[in-house]
Image: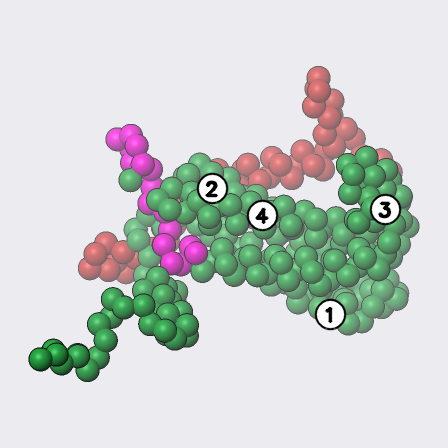
Chain colours: A green, B red
Amino acid sequence: MEAAKPAVAPQTERPASWTLRVRRAIEEHLPTDHLLPDRQPYYVGSWVYVFGVVTIAALVWVIVSGVVLSFMGPQWWHDSRLGHFFNSLHFWSVQLFFLFMVLHLWGQYFMAGWRSGRAATWMIGVVIFGISILTAFTGYLSQQNFASQFIAVNAKDAMNGAGVGAFFNVLNFGQMYGLHIMLLPVGVTFLVVAHIVMVRARGVVKPIDPEGGAR
Amino acid sequence: MDSPTTYFHWGFILISLPNLFVIIGMIVLFAAAVIAPFPHGGEGDDGSR
Protein backbone atom coordinates (compact mmCIF):
# COMPACT_ATOMS: atom_id res chain seq x y z
CA MET A 1 0.00 0.00 0.00
CA GLU A 2 1.35 3.42 -0.94
CA ALA A 3 2.24 5.76 1.97
CA ALA A 4 0.17 8.91 2.27
CA LYS A 5 1.96 12.03 1.05
CA PRO A 6 2.39 14.85 3.55
CA ALA A 7 -0.11 17.67 3.09
CA VAL A 8 2.59 20.38 3.22
CA ALA A 9 5.93 20.07 1.45
CA PRO A 10 8.93 20.35 3.79
CA GLN A 11 10.77 23.72 3.79
CA THR A 12 13.99 22.13 2.56
CA GLU A 13 12.51 21.51 -0.89
CA ARG A 14 13.31 24.07 -3.55
CA PRO A 15 9.97 25.77 -4.31
CA ALA A 16 8.91 26.02 -7.95
CA SER A 17 7.80 29.64 -7.53
CA TRP A 18 10.67 32.09 -8.03
CA THR A 19 8.90 34.77 -6.00
CA LEU A 20 8.76 32.36 -3.05
CA ARG A 21 12.46 31.54 -3.47
CA VAL A 22 13.34 35.25 -3.54
CA ARG A 23 11.14 35.95 -0.51
CA ARG A 24 12.72 33.13 1.49
CA ALA A 25 16.23 34.28 0.50
CA ILE A 26 15.43 37.83 1.66
CA GLU A 27 13.91 36.57 4.92
CA GLU A 28 16.99 34.40 5.52
CA HIS A 29 19.74 36.87 4.58
CA LEU A 30 18.16 40.26 5.19
CA PRO A 31 15.63 40.18 8.04
CA THR A 32 14.13 43.57 8.86
CA ASP A 33 16.03 43.83 12.15
CA HIS A 34 19.25 43.65 10.10
CA LEU A 35 17.96 46.08 7.47
CA LEU A 36 16.78 48.71 9.95
CA PRO A 37 18.55 48.01 13.25
CA ASP A 38 17.83 50.11 16.31
CA ARG A 39 20.99 48.98 18.12
CA GLN A 40 24.57 48.45 17.04
CA PRO A 41 27.42 46.43 18.55
CA TYR A 42 29.56 48.32 21.12
CA TYR A 43 32.52 48.67 18.72
CA VAL A 44 30.43 50.78 16.31
CA GLY A 45 30.62 53.60 18.89
CA SER A 46 33.29 55.59 17.03
CA TRP A 47 33.23 58.64 14.76
CA VAL A 48 35.05 56.58 12.12
CA TYR A 49 31.76 54.81 11.35
CA VAL A 50 30.09 58.16 10.61
CA PHE A 51 32.15 58.76 7.45
CA GLY A 52 30.12 56.30 5.37
CA VAL A 53 26.75 57.81 6.23
CA VAL A 54 28.07 61.36 5.69
CA THR A 55 29.17 60.21 2.22
CA ILE A 56 25.60 59.03 1.54
CA ALA A 57 24.23 62.36 2.82
CA ALA A 58 26.54 64.21 0.42
CA LEU A 59 25.40 61.91 -2.42
CA VAL A 60 21.77 62.81 -1.69
CA TRP A 61 22.64 66.51 -2.05
CA VAL A 62 24.59 65.79 -5.23
CA ILE A 63 21.57 64.05 -6.75
CA VAL A 64 19.00 66.62 -5.58
CA SER A 65 21.04 69.59 -6.84
CA GLY A 66 21.88 67.69 -10.05
CA VAL A 67 18.21 67.02 -10.79
CA VAL A 68 17.46 70.75 -10.39
CA LEU A 69 20.42 71.72 -12.64
CA SER A 70 19.45 69.24 -15.36
CA PHE A 71 15.85 70.47 -15.30
CA MET A 72 16.72 74.19 -15.44
CA GLY A 73 19.63 74.05 -17.92
CA PRO A 74 23.03 75.72 -18.48
CA GLN A 75 21.79 79.28 -19.08
CA TRP A 76 20.04 79.24 -15.70
CA TRP A 77 23.00 77.90 -13.76
CA HIS A 78 25.35 80.45 -15.39
CA ASP A 79 23.18 83.58 -15.45
CA SER A 80 20.87 83.59 -12.43
CA ARG A 81 21.73 83.97 -8.74
CA LEU A 82 19.66 80.93 -7.78
CA GLY A 83 21.33 79.02 -10.61
CA HIS A 84 24.77 79.98 -9.24
CA PHE A 85 23.65 78.78 -5.82
CA PHE A 86 22.54 75.36 -7.11
CA ASN A 87 25.68 75.11 -9.25
CA SER A 88 27.76 75.72 -6.12
CA LEU A 89 25.61 73.33 -4.11
CA HIS A 90 26.27 70.62 -6.71
CA PHE A 91 30.01 71.33 -6.84
CA TRP A 92 30.62 71.50 -3.08
CA SER A 93 28.46 68.48 -2.26
CA VAL A 94 30.60 66.54 -4.77
CA GLN A 95 33.75 67.76 -2.97
CA LEU A 96 32.31 66.55 0.36
CA PHE A 97 31.19 63.26 -1.25
CA PHE A 98 34.76 62.52 -2.37
CA LEU A 99 36.36 63.78 0.84
CA PHE A 100 34.20 61.60 3.09
CA MET A 101 34.33 58.64 0.68
CA VAL A 102 38.15 58.68 0.97
CA LEU A 103 37.95 58.99 4.79
CA HIS A 104 35.51 56.03 4.78
CA LEU A 105 38.00 54.15 2.57
CA TRP A 106 40.85 54.87 5.02
CA GLY A 107 38.72 53.70 7.95
CA GLN A 108 37.71 50.47 6.22
CA TYR A 109 41.29 49.85 5.04
CA PHE A 110 42.78 50.13 8.54
CA MET A 111 40.04 47.92 10.07
CA ALA A 112 40.35 45.46 7.14
CA GLY A 113 36.65 45.79 6.33
CA TRP A 114 36.79 42.98 3.75
CA ARG A 115 37.12 40.26 6.42
CA SER A 116 34.59 37.49 7.18
CA GLY A 117 32.88 37.26 3.81
CA ARG A 118 32.78 41.00 3.09
CA ALA A 119 35.12 40.97 0.06
CA ALA A 120 32.27 41.71 -2.37
CA THR A 121 31.18 44.68 -0.25
CA TRP A 122 34.75 46.05 -0.38
CA MET A 123 35.05 45.47 -4.14
CA ILE A 124 31.70 47.17 -4.84
CA GLY A 125 33.07 50.13 -2.86
CA VAL A 126 36.15 50.14 -5.11
CA VAL A 127 33.93 50.13 -8.22
CA ILE A 128 31.79 52.97 -6.77
CA PHE A 129 34.99 54.99 -6.25
CA GLY A 130 36.06 54.38 -9.86
CA ILE A 131 32.67 55.23 -11.38
CA SER A 132 32.45 58.33 -9.16
CA ILE A 133 35.75 59.62 -10.60
CA LEU A 134 34.39 59.09 -14.12
CA THR A 135 31.14 60.86 -13.13
CA ALA A 136 33.06 63.83 -11.71
CA PHE A 137 35.21 64.01 -14.87
CA THR A 138 32.19 64.06 -17.18
CA GLY A 139 30.70 66.68 -14.83
CA TYR A 140 33.66 68.98 -15.38
CA LEU A 141 33.09 68.49 -19.13
CA SER A 142 29.38 69.34 -18.76
CA GLN A 143 29.78 72.80 -17.22
CA GLN A 144 29.24 74.59 -20.56
CA ASN A 145 31.98 77.18 -19.98
CA PHE A 146 35.57 77.83 -21.07
CA ALA A 147 36.95 75.59 -18.32
CA SER A 148 35.01 72.59 -19.64
CA GLN A 149 36.22 73.31 -23.19
CA PHE A 150 39.82 73.61 -21.96
CA ILE A 151 39.53 70.30 -20.06
CA ALA A 152 37.91 68.53 -23.02
CA VAL A 153 40.54 69.67 -25.56
CA ASN A 154 43.42 68.78 -23.25
CA ALA A 155 41.90 65.45 -22.24
CA LYS A 156 41.29 64.40 -25.85
CA ASP A 157 44.93 63.46 -26.51
CA ALA A 158 45.13 61.58 -23.22
CA MET A 159 41.96 59.59 -24.01
CA ASN A 160 43.21 58.83 -27.53
CA GLY A 161 46.58 57.80 -26.09
CA ALA A 162 44.80 55.48 -23.65
CA GLY A 163 42.96 53.90 -26.60
CA VAL A 164 39.44 54.87 -25.50
CA GLY A 165 38.99 58.02 -27.64
CA ALA A 166 36.90 56.28 -30.29
CA PHE A 167 34.02 55.35 -27.98
CA PHE A 168 34.63 57.85 -25.13
CA ASN A 169 34.91 61.14 -27.01
CA VAL A 170 35.44 63.99 -24.56
CA LEU A 171 34.78 66.53 -27.34
CA ASN A 172 31.29 65.08 -27.82
CA PHE A 173 29.30 67.16 -25.34
CA GLY A 174 26.09 65.15 -25.82
CA GLN A 175 27.86 61.91 -24.93
CA MET A 176 29.60 63.41 -21.87
CA TYR A 177 26.40 65.11 -20.63
CA GLY A 178 24.32 61.97 -21.17
CA LEU A 179 26.84 59.87 -19.29
CA HIS A 180 27.04 62.45 -16.50
CA ILE A 181 23.34 62.96 -15.80
CA MET A 182 21.99 59.48 -16.58
CA LEU A 183 24.13 56.38 -16.97
CA LEU A 184 26.89 57.04 -14.43
CA PRO A 185 24.68 58.46 -11.60
CA VAL A 186 22.28 55.53 -11.99
CA GLY A 187 25.29 53.18 -11.77
CA VAL A 188 26.66 54.91 -8.66
CA THR A 189 23.24 55.00 -6.95
CA PHE A 190 22.50 51.33 -7.73
CA LEU A 191 25.91 50.21 -6.44
CA VAL A 192 25.62 52.38 -3.30
CA VAL A 193 22.26 50.74 -2.53
CA ALA A 194 23.83 47.29 -3.10
CA HIS A 195 26.79 48.30 -0.89
CA ILE A 196 24.48 49.37 1.96
CA VAL A 197 22.29 46.25 1.68
CA MET A 198 25.41 44.05 1.84
CA VAL A 199 26.67 45.91 4.92
CA ARG A 200 23.25 45.51 6.57
CA ALA A 201 23.05 41.80 5.67
CA ARG A 202 26.37 40.91 7.35
CA GLY A 203 26.60 43.75 9.88
CA VAL A 204 29.63 45.91 10.59
CA VAL A 205 32.94 44.03 10.63
CA LYS A 206 34.31 43.24 14.10
CA PRO A 207 37.52 44.94 15.24
CA ILE A 208 40.77 43.12 14.57
CA ASP A 209 41.67 40.90 17.53
CA PRO A 210 44.27 42.77 19.62
CA GLU A 211 45.83 39.35 20.49
CA GLY A 212 46.60 38.84 16.79
CA GLY A 213 44.67 37.38 13.87
CA ALA A 214 41.24 38.28 12.61
CA ARG A 215 38.05 37.35 14.41
CA MET B 1 41.37 84.60 -6.94
CA ASP B 2 42.44 84.21 -10.58
CA SER B 3 46.19 84.32 -9.89
CA PRO B 4 48.11 81.03 -10.01
CA THR B 5 48.49 79.27 -6.69
CA THR B 6 51.70 78.35 -4.88
CA TYR B 7 53.17 74.92 -5.58
CA PHE B 8 55.44 72.89 -3.34
CA HIS B 9 58.10 70.77 -4.99
CA TRP B 10 59.97 68.12 -2.99
CA GLY B 11 61.85 65.72 -5.25
CA PHE B 12 59.24 63.87 -7.31
CA ILE B 13 56.35 65.32 -5.26
CA LEU B 14 54.63 68.38 -6.76
CA ILE B 15 51.50 69.62 -5.01
CA SER B 16 49.54 72.87 -4.89
CA LEU B 17 48.97 74.65 -1.59
CA PRO B 18 45.14 74.17 -1.68
CA ASN B 19 45.48 70.44 -2.34
CA LEU B 20 48.03 70.16 0.47
CA PHE B 21 45.58 71.92 2.83
CA VAL B 22 42.79 69.50 1.87
CA ILE B 23 44.97 66.43 2.46
CA ILE B 24 46.26 67.76 5.81
CA GLY B 25 42.67 68.58 6.80
CA MET B 26 41.54 65.04 5.92
CA ILE B 27 44.36 63.49 7.99
CA VAL B 28 43.49 65.75 10.95
CA LEU B 29 39.77 64.88 10.61
CA PHE B 30 40.55 61.14 10.44
CA ALA B 31 42.81 61.33 13.51
CA ALA B 32 40.14 63.32 15.39
CA ALA B 33 37.49 60.72 14.48
CA VAL B 34 39.69 57.93 15.87
CA ILE B 35 40.60 59.79 19.07
CA ALA B 36 37.45 61.80 19.91
CA PRO B 37 35.02 60.09 22.31
CA PHE B 38 31.70 59.06 20.77
CA PRO B 39 28.51 59.93 22.68
CA HIS B 40 26.75 56.75 23.78
CA GLY B 41 23.09 56.13 24.44
CA GLY B 42 21.75 53.42 26.71
CA GLU B 43 23.39 50.00 26.62
CA GLY B 44 21.46 46.92 25.55
CA ASP B 45 21.33 43.61 27.44
CA ASP B 46 23.98 42.15 25.15
CA GLY B 47 26.33 45.14 25.39
CA SER B 48 24.99 46.65 22.16
CA ARG B 49 24.36 50.38 21.98
Work out whether A176 lies above or below B20: below
Cα distance in 3D space between marks 2 and 3: 34 Å
Residue kind at label 2, given as amino acid type? Gly
Mark toward the start of the polypeptide (2 vs 1): 1
The chain containing the residue under callout 4 comes to: A
Earlier sequence position, callout 4 versus callout 1: 1
Main secondary-structure element of the magenta-colored stretch: loop
Mark 2 Cα within 10 Å, few/some/many (few <14, many 20+)?
Answer: some
Give the quadrant of residue A65.
bottom right
- Please name the residue that numbered disc 1 is placed on: A68
Write down the chain letter for disc 2. A
Numbered badge on residue A107:
2
Q: Which of B39 and A14 is in front in this view?
A: A14
At 53% across and 48% down in the image, what residue appears?
Answer: A125
Q: Earlier in the sequence, mark 4 or mark 3?
A: 4
Q: Give the range drawn in magenta.
A: A198-214
Q: Is residue A44 left or right of residue A128?
A: left
Is disc 3 surrounded by few (<14), some (14 to 19) or many (20+) residues within 10 Å?
many
Residue located beneath label 4 in the image? A127
Same chain assignment for discs 3 and 1: yes
For the residues labelled 2 and 3, say whether their Cβ atoms are less than 8 Å apart: no
Q: Are marks 2 and 1 on the same chain?
A: yes
Badge 2 and badge 4 both on one subunit: yes
